[in-house]
C-alpha cells in the first residue's frame, strides 16, 4: 500500500524533468487539491522470480512472494554460476573466427528468466479533472505492465525511460494494483545487464490541463558576457492557457520572469533574458532553475520546475570542441551501468562516489556505454561538472549477439531515441549524443542510411547537439560513407588509423569514442615487465604495470600522444572508468573470471595504479606522485623488479634503501617514456624505495616512499563519509586494509574477514575487486584482495549511529562509527 507524500519527501530534487512545488504550499496558496502529485513507488513491492499464471489479477494472492524495495536487481545476490551464461561463440568484434566456450560474459549471475513485481497504490486526489501518468525510468527487460488486472502496455528495451497515460484504468476510491512482468532472455547482452525494476517507478497525478510529460525544452542560443537568451519551449494540454515562467539563480533568487498566452498548436515559446549569466562548465557547474505555472482562465492548473545550465558548445573543424569559447578536450571514461557489488539497482550515493573518484583523477567527461544513462547520473553530472556523451544502442539491425537489440531495432529505435532526448535534453552536462557502438551495420550498404536516419531523429528532437557513433570498422566506414555521414566521427581504438580517418572524413575532427582497453588487476604485478596483448596468467589476473591490452587495443600512453599532438582529436573516453560485471577479457574462456579487468578503478571503486597515470596527465591542479609496484617480494631478492613512477613532474630520482638508481626524465623516445618514469633494472631487496621528483628547474619538489611490510597485524577502516543521510538509501563506503605493527600497508594480505553491523543501518555489500572471486557480495564475510576490500553500509530511516566491526584471524579487530542524520 502507498500513500501520497509531498514531492520533497518522495523524490530527490531535480530527479525528473518535472516535479511539483509541494503539496502544502499549493494547498495553502490556493485552498484546493495540489495541482501535481508525484508518487514514487519504492517500498512494499512483492517480487517473485519465475513466470506465474494470473499474477496480474487484482485478487491474486502474493503474500508468499518476497517483499522488496525498488530500485531492485533480482540477480545481484547470485550465486555466481558458470552454467548461467556459458556460450560457445566466436566474438566477431574481438576478431575471433572460431567459436570457443565463454563463461562469465554477462557476470555469471542469474538474470535470465521471468520475474514479476506487484504493488498497490491509492490516489485520494484523483477526480474527473485528473490525468495519471505511470513512468518507468528503466525496467530490465521487456516489461509488460498491468493495472487492475488489465494489460496497459509494454516496452522492449530495458534501458529506455517510458510512460503510459493510465487515467482510464485508475480506480479512484480503491487500491490500484500494478503488476509488471519482466523477461530477460539469454544471449541478449554482452555484459551484466541486471534484472528487474532497477530504476525508479513513479505515478504522476496532474490536471488534464497541464504541462506534458517531458514537454519542456530549454536552450541557450545566445550568450554574451552581459546577457543570455534562454529559449523555453513548453508543450501543454488544455485550452485558454497562460504560462508564467520564472528563472531563479543557484541561490533561489528570481532573475527573470515571463508570461506568455500565445500558443502555437500545443507549444508555448519564450525567449527570456538572463543578465550577467553564470556559465555552466565542469569547473563551475552553475545551475539555474526554471519554474513553470500554467493557468487556465486564471486558475492555477500545473506547476513544475526544471534545472538547466547556461552554456555554449561548438564543434569546429581543425579547432575542436569548445565550451563557452574555450577549447576543451574530453578527458572521459566509458561506464557501464552496474555499480559493482550492488548491481544495477540505481543508488545516488554510489554514483556520487564514482564521480568524486573520477573528479579527483581529473576526468571531465562520461560516456554512458552503450545505453541510456540513469537520470540520477545526469543530475549528478550537472551538479558536479562532467560533460556527458549519452549513448543509445550497442546494436542496430544487424546482430552482435543472438537476442540483442536487433530484434527491436526496426520497430523501436525511433521511439527509444525520442524518449532519450525528451527525458534528458535539459541537462547541460549532455554535449553529444551517440546513436550506436561498433554496430555491425558499419558493414554493408544499409549502414550509412541507418546512421543518417538515426542522426536525423536526434537532430529533429534536439538541433543543439551533434551525434557520433563509436566505430571500430574504420576502413569499412571510410569506404561506405558511413563515417562521412556522422556529425562527429568516433573511433574506437585503432590509433594507427586516426590520421587516415582524419584525412578521409570531411568533418575535420576525430573523437576517441573508446580508447585504451588496457587490462590490470589491482595490486598484482607480473614479471618480466613487457608489453603484451591478450596475455594470460595461471591466476587469471592481469599485471598492474599497465602494459597489457587486448589484440584490438593499446596502452593509455598511445592515446595520450594523439590527444597531445593532434588538435583535431577532440578527446577520449577510456574503456573503462570502473571495472564492471561481465566481459572478463582476456579470460573470457577461463572460469571463474566473471568481471572485467579494464577499469581504471576496480569493481569496489578502489584505484588501480593506472588511476595515477591518468591523474598525472588529467588533473592539472594537484600534484601526482605514485610509485609501483608494492615492495613485498619475498622470494624475488636479487631479481629484476622494475619500478615505475606516475607523476605530474617531468623527472625524478629513485633510491632503493638509500642508494640512487639514477634520474629518469620523461622523453619522446616511445609513448610510454613520454608519460611514465621507468627504472627497468632495479633488483629487489626488502626495505624502502623512495622517489624524489624535480620541478622544471631541477629542484626537488616532492618525495614519496614505500616500505616492505612485516607481518599483518591490524585492520584499518576508512569511510568515504563519516555522516550520511538517514533516508534508508544512503551508503557509506568503508575501505578496509591491513597494516603491520609499524602501520605499513600489507599489500599481499588475503585474510578472510567478517563484518558485524549494529545500530541505525545495515550491511549492504562487500567487494574486494578480485575478478575471479565467487564470494557473494551480500554475505558479511569476504577475503581481502591485495590487502584491501570495501564494505558498504546503508542507513535506516532513523537518525543515529552505525557501528561496523571488522575481524579476521590473527588480526586486531577494528571498529568504525558512521553517523546518520535526517
Ligand atoms: C569494445 C566494445 C566495448 C567492450 C570493449 C572491450 O570493442 O565497444 O563494449 O567490449 O571493446 O575492449
Image: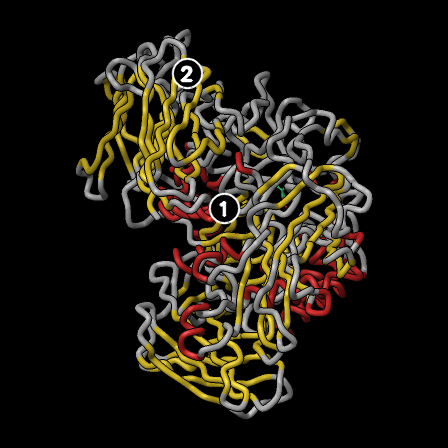
- Looking at the picture, does residue 2 appear above or below residue 46? below
**Residue 428 against residue 622 in the figure, above or below:** below
Judged left or right of residue 788, residue 200 is: right
Instruction: Tell me which colouring the rendered structure shows.
Output: secondary structure
Label 2 crowd bin: few (<14), some (14–19), many (20+), radius 10 Å: some
For residue 336, say whether it is visible.
Answer: no
Residue nearer the viewer, 609 or 605: 605
Asked whether, in this view, residue 476 is left or right of residue 334, the answer is right
Residue displayed at 74% across by 48% down = 181
Closer to us: 143 or 389: 143
Q: Which dot marks residue 50? A: none
Q: Which mark is residue 347?
A: 1
Q: Kindly tell me whether mark 1's CB lies below 8 Å from ligand 1.
A: no
Measured as percent of width and height from the top left, residue 74 is found at 64, 38
> Residue 38, how many percent across, how many down?
54, 63
Q: Position of residue 50 (x, y in %)?
A: 76, 37
| Identity of the residue drawn at 60% across and 31% down | 77
The quarter of the image that holds ligand 1 is top right
Q: Which mark is residue 749?
A: 2
Residue 84 in view (yes/no): yes
Element marked by disc 1: loop
Tell me residue 405's x, y (percent). Answer: 75, 51
- Figure check: 92 above or below 481: above
Could you tell whether 269 is left or right of 760 in the image?
right
Instruction: Using a 10 Å C-alpha cutoff, classify the residue at mark 1 as few (fewer than 14 neighbours), some (14 to 19) or many (20 or more).
Output: many
Q: Among all residues in the image, which is located at the extreme left?
A: 699
Tell me the element at label 2: loop
Amino acid at each position: 500500500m502507498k500513500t501520497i507524500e509531498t514531492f520533497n519527501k518522495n523524490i530527490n530534487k531535480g530527479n525528473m524533468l518535472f516535479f511539483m512545488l509541494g503539496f502544502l504550499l499549493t494547498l495553502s496558496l490556493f485552498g484546493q487539491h495540489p495541482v501535481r502529485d508525484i508518487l514514487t513507488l519504492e517500498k512494499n513491492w512483492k517480487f517473485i522470480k519465475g513466470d506465474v499464471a494470473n499474477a496480474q489479477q487484482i485478487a491474486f494472492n502474493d503474500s508468499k512472494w518476497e517483499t522488496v524495495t525498488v530500485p531492485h536487481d533480482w540477480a545481484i545476490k547470485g550465486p555466481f554460476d558458470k552454467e548461467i551464461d556459458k556460450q560457445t561463440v566466436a566474438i566477431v568484434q574481438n576478431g575471433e573466427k572460431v567459436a570457443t566456450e565463454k563463461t562469465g560474459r554477462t557476470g555469471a549471475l542469474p538474470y535470465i528468466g521471468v520475474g514479476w513485481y506487484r504493488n498497490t497504490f491509492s490516489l485520494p486526489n484523483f477526480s474527473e479533472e485528473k490525468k495519471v501518468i505511470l513512468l518507468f525510468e528503466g525496467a530490465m527487460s521487456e516489461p509488460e505492465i498491468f493495472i487492475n488486472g488489465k494489460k496497459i502496455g509494454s516496452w522492449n528495451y530495458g534501458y529506455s525511460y517510458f510512460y503510459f497515460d493510465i487515467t482510464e484504468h485508475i480506480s479512484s476510491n480503491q487500491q490500484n494494483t500494478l503488476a509488471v512482468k519482466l523477461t530477460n532472455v539469454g544471449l541478449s547482452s554482452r555484459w551484466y545487464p541486471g534484472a528487474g525494476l532497477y530504476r525508479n517507478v513513479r505515478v504522476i497525478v496532474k490536471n488534464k490541463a497541464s504541462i506534458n510529460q517531458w514537454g519542456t525544452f530549454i536552450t541557450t542560443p545566445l550568450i554574451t558576457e552581459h546577457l543570455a537568451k534562454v529559449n523555453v519551449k513548453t508543450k501543454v494540454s488544455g485550452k485558454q492557457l497562460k504560462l508564467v515562467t520564472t528563472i531563479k539563480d543557484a541561490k533561489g533568487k528570481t532573475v527573470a520572469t515571463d508570461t506568455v498566452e500565445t500558443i502555437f498548436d500545443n507549444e508555448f515559446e519564450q525567449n527570456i533574458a538572463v543578465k550577467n549569466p553564470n556559465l555552466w562548465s565542469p569547473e563551475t557547474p552553475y545551475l539555474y532553475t526554471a519554474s513553470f505555472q500554467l493557468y487556465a482562465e486564471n486558475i492555477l492548473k500545473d506547476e513544475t520546475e526544471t534545472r538547466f545550465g547556461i552554456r555554449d558548445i561548438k564543434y569546429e573543424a581543425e579547432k575542436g570542441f569548445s565550451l563557452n569559447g574555450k577549447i576543451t578536450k574530453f578527458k572521459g571514461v566509458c561506464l557501464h551501468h552496474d555499480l559493482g557489488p550492488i548491481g544495477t539497482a540505481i543508488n545516488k550515493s554510489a554514483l556520487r562516489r564514482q564521480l568524486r573518484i573520477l573528479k579527483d583523477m581529473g576526468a571531465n567527461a562520461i560516456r554512458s556505454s552503450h545505453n541510456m544513462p540513469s537520470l540520477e547520473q545526469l543530475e549528478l553530472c550537472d551538479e558536479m561538472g562532467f560533460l556527458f556523451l549519452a549513448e543509445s544502442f550497442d546494436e542496430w539491425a544487424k546482430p552482435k549477439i543472438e537476442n540483442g537489440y536487433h530484434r527491436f531495432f526496426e520497430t523501436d529505435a525511433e521511439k527509444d531515441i525520442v524518449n532519450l532526448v525528451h527525458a534528458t535534453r535539459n541537462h547541460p552536462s549532455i554535449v553529444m549524443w551517440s546513436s550506436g557502438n561498433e554496430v555491425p551495420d558499419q558493414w554493408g550498404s544499409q549502414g550509412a542510411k541507418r546512421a543518417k536516419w538515426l542522426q536525423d531523429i536526434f537532430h529533429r528532437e534536439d538541433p543543439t547537439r551533434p551525434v557520433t557513433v563509436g566505430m571500430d570498422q574504420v576502413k569499412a566506414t571510410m569506404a561506405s560513407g558511413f563515417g562521412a555521414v556522422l556529425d562527429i566521427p568516433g573511433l574506437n581504438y585503432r590509433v594507427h588509423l586516426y590520421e587516415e580517418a582524419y584525412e578521409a572524413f570531411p568533418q575535420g575532427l576525430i573523437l576517441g569514442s573508446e580508447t585504451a582497453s588496457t587490462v590490470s588487476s589491482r595490486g598484482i604485478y607480473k614479471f618480466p615487465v613487457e608489453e603484451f596483448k591478450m596475455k594470460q596468467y595461471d591466476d587469471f589476473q592481469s599485471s598492474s604495470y599497465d602494459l597489457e591490452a587486448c589484440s584490438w587495443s593499446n596502452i593509455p600512453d598511445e592515446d595520450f600522444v594523439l590527444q597531445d599532438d593532434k588538435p583535431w582529436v577532440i578527446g577520449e573516453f577510456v574503456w573503462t572508468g570502473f571495472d564492471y560485471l561481465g566481459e572478463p577479457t582476456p579470460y573470457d574462456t577461463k572460469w571463474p573470471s566473471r568481471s572485467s579487468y579494464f577499469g581504471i578503478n576496480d569493481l569496489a571503486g578502489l584505484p588501480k595504479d593506472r588511476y595515477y597515470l591518468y591523474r598525472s596527465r588529467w588533473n592539472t591542479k594537484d600534484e601526482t606522485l605514485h610509485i609501483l609496484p608494492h615492495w613485498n617480494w619475498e622470494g624475488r631478492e636479487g631479481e629484476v623488479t622494475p619500478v615505475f613512477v606516475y607523476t605530474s613532474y617531468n623527472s625524478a630520482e629513485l633510491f632503493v634503501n638509500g642508494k640512487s638508481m639514477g634520474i629518469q626524465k620523461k622523453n619522446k623516445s616511445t609513448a610510454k617514456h613520454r608519460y611514465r618514469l621507468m627504472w627497468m633494472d632495479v633488483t629487489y631487496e626488502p626495505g624502502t624505495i623512495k622517489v624524489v621528483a624535480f620541478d622544471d628547474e631541477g629542484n626537488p619538489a616532492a618525495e614519496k616512499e614505500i616500505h616492505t611490510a612485516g607481518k599483518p597485524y591490524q585492520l584499518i577502516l576508512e569511510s568515504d563519509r563519516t555522516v550520511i543521510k538517514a533516508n534508508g538509501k544512503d551508503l557509506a563506503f568503508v575501505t578496509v586494509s591491513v597494516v603491520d605493527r609499524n602501520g605499513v600497508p600489507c599489500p599481499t594480505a588475503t585474510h578472510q574477514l567478517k563484518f558485524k553491523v549494529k545500530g541505525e543501518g545495515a550491511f549492504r555489500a562487500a567487494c574486494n575487486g578480485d575478478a575471479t572471486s565467487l564470494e557473494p557480495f551480500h554475505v558479511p564475510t569476504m577475503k581481502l584482495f591485495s590487502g584491501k576490500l570495501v564494505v558498504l553500509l546503508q542507513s535506516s530511516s532513523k537518525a543515529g549511529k552505525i557501528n561496523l566491526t571488522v575481524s579476521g584471524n590473527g588480526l586486531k579487530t577494528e571498529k568504525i562509527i558512521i553517523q546518520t542524520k535526517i
